[in-house]
Amino acid sequence: MSDQFNTLKARTERVLCSTYGRYPLGVARAEGCRLTDFEGREYVDLLAGIAVCNLGHCRPELARVMAEQAQKLVHVSNLFYQEEQVEFAEALTSAMGLDKVFLCNSGAEANEAAIKLARRYMRTVKQRDAYEVVTLEGSFHGRTLATLTATGQGKVKEHFQPLPEGFVTVPWDDPAALDDAVTGKTAAVLVELVQGEGGVRPMSTEYVAAVERICRDKDVLLMVDEIQTGMGRTGNFMAYQHYGVSPDIVTLAKGLANGLPMGAMVTTDEVAGGFAPGAHATTFGGGGVVSAVALEVLRIIQDDKLVQRTRTEGQYFLGKLHDLVDEFPDTLEEARGVGLMLGLVFREPAGWAWQALLAHGFVANCTQERVLRFLPPLILPREDIDATIDALRDILSA
């Protein structure tokens, strides 16, 4: 490591809380699908800020909108009517086929809003004392006390007890267990249709249909966490569109504003009736700059046909990963995922694999110990996919 990097690392450790296991990489700048370190070395970005920079880094159109809006209106709070957030909300609800939006700043906040709305809707509209939220093992819904309790991974909950009441976690892909867990106390079922932190696991069509059927039969809300899967990531604008289901509430963040902090909870007119003025709020949500940028993100996704591109390039990338599994069956178990949300599953812990890729000039990450995860910008060139496969083949051969 260079002296410049070591100095930056020391300064970071001195003043920032130690909550991240950081990579041995200092990023000086980024453009498109490339990160550049302080020594000038370039890396192919296969992580996109964890499914955030879907349009690539430092997109000129977004920089222009950001600069222009910063000279017009940045923040006045949600005590006032603002054209920028209404224009974005209109475009987002139109693209999703839903009616109402609550704008916030992160995925955890979007899920918090969904949980609060589900409980308040049941009590004020349905007149039922139903408050429990049922989630799945392996899920990841955030780091606040409520959302980490909803998360179906024990490791994120260690040393934070006592945790809030009102959350039940059931096994993955087990309709009978879900049916048993949904009772008169249940307000909603919250699911990721493709688990991200859970190891890039897509739900089966049959299980998703069972989840929706149970919610409808028992009159509870179906809430879909699209924080990692939304905004074209899976080859549809939203992952639920693969399955033909109609969620009552959808939560979004990550790719909404391509790197600016933004979250959204999107719902129907009926369910939105559970909120009233003063029932929920945020100081910064949907400010002028982030809303203007998010609207431009939607425009680029639509005009550049990035959803269709993601579907095609994702199939190509997944096919190449399947080829690697066939070539190295003793090391690799399977390749899975949808769109440009892909995982290469190793038979043994694979923390070494992302480090080896980094040494070759490619940035990915490992989740659930054995899954090498790829979440590249949706504009990733095919030659970068081929170069990634070649690097993986070299690493696995060695």
Image (cartoon, helix red, strand yellow):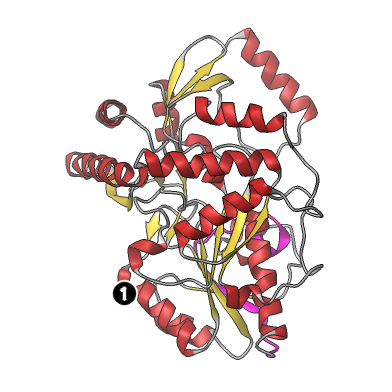
Q: Up-down: is 260 above or below 199? A: above
Query: What's under tag 1, amino acid-wise?
Result: Glu
Q: Residue at x 36, y 38 (%)?
A: 304
* Camera-nearest residue between 216 and 306: 306
Foreground residue, 95 or 148? 95
Give the residues drawn in magenta, as a range: 128-148
Residue on which the image places disc 1: 206
Quadrant of the snapshot with the C terminus: top left
Q: Is residue 88 visible?
A: yes
Spot occupied by residue 218 in the image (x, y as percentages of width and height): 51, 89
Q: Is residue 377 magenta?
A: no
Using a 10 Å C-alpha cutoff, classify the residue at mark 1 as few (fewer than 14 neighbours), some (14 to 19) or many (20 or more): few
Q: Position of residue 190 (x, y in %)?
A: 54, 70
Residue at (44, 38) in percent of width and height: 300
Q: Please tell me whether residue 246 is drawn above or below residue 62 in the rendered image.
A: below
Residue at 46%, 31% (x, y): give it: 56
Quarter of the figure with residue 33: top left
Give left or right: position of 244 versus 128. Answer: left
Q: How many marks?
A: 1
Image spot of residue 82 (x, y percent):
71, 49
178 and 259: which is toward the camera: 259
* Quarter of the image where the N terminus is located: top right
**Rendered location of residue 200, percent (x, y):** 40, 52
**Quarter of the view holding residue 26:** top right
For mark 1, give the secondary structure. Answer: helix
Residue drawn at x 23%, y 41% as measured from the top left: 316
Q: Is residue 354 left or right of residue 3?
A: left
Membership of 139 in magenta stretch: yes
Asked if residue 343 shows in the view, the reply is: no
